[in-house]
Amino acid sequence: MADSNATPVKAPGVSSALPKDALRLSESSLIPGDSETIAAWKIAFFGAIILLVALPIFRPDPFREILSFVPDGLTATFTVTLASICLALVIGLLAGLGRIARTKVINRIATVYVEVVRGIPLLVQLFYIYYALGPLLHLNGLMSAIAALSFCYGAYLAEIFRAGLQSIPKGQMEAALALGMSRTQALWRIILPQTIRVILPPIGNEFIALLKDSSLVSILAVSDLLRRGREFASTTFHYLEAYTVVALIYLIMTLFFSRLVGIMEERLRTHGRKHH
């Protein structure tokens, strides 16, 4: 018989927040929230856009040439970022499940992976995978970059998944088992859907952080945004102008996605209040 104190099997609101250790993994300061933060976000975002538009108008040489030179880098940046976050989500989910697994061996492997990867700087991991493992596995610069970013961010996402899974009341699992579900069925049908709603904002923050860290792949001969800017600067010696454009583009992208994450978090919070 089911425990009379078991919580009914229904999706809880967002009010059941993640534990504090998971929230520390995200860059919550990036998300516009209160009115003052939103006002500052608008100043930074639209100010960067206005500046990026005005520079080629008032100084066509060299800013127009720079803006025609860097779009290829944007494609590479988004390719690396999107591929890495997708793979990191899979790795993070598996490692997060391993972190709460009852099997001691699986739990130990997942824990060691998380602790080791989080203890090594991303730049070192990029060099290691490209120069040490790349020749053995026949990985080019792009594949090495995606592998390193996925492997690194998978460890951080694992902790987010772990904290999200543990934030769901145990009564949810007990009630699902009382209804005749197996633990696996209860996990995929009841626990994970609720967990995903809770962890979406932190995952959004990790995506923003990954977008910025993707600039590190320029050291692996990947023609991303930063490398294209560096190539232009090294041939024309317009270092200030080239890096100003690169910085403005990164700022616009980061602020844009931070606003999307903020909107998503607010909608989840509003949806959660409606269910209470």
Image (cartoon, helix red, strand yellow):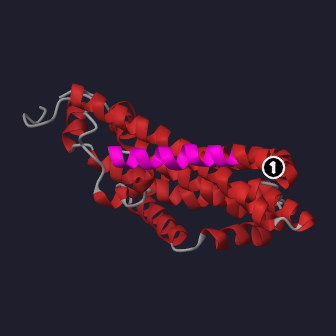
Residue 150 image offset from top left, x and y in percent: 62, 55
Q: Nearer the viewer, residue 112 or 242?
A: 242
Q: Residue at x 55, y 57 (%)?
A: 153
Q: Quadrant of the N terminus?
A: top left
In this picture, residue 160 sits left or right of residue 257: left
For the residue marked with disc 1, what is the amino acid?
Val
Give the magenta-colored segment's residue range: 35-52
Disc 1, SS: loop
Quarter of the C terminus within the rendering? top left
Which image quadrant is residue 180 in?
A: top left
Q: Is residue 57 visible?
A: yes
Q: How many marks?
A: 1
- Which of 140/233 is in front? 233
216 in the magenta segment: no
The residue wearing badge 1 is: 70
Q: Residue furthest right?
A: 235
Asked which quadrant contains residue 130, the reply is: bottom right
Q: Residue furthest front?
A: 58
Badge 1 crowding class, 10 Å Cα cut-off, few under 14, some 14 to 19, many 20 or more, is many
Can you tell which quarter of the image residue 201 is in?
top left
Q: Residue at x 45, y 59 (%)?
A: 106
**Where residue 184 appears, x then y in whole percent?**
38, 37
**x, y percent for residue 210:** 59, 54
Image vertical order of residue 111 relative to residue 157, above or below: below
Q: Is residue 39 magenta?
A: yes
Residue 198: image location, x then y, percent: 35, 41
Prevalent SS, magenta region: helix
Q: Nearer the viewer, residue 145 or 274?
A: 274
- Out of 199 and 76, give the one closest to the viewer: 76
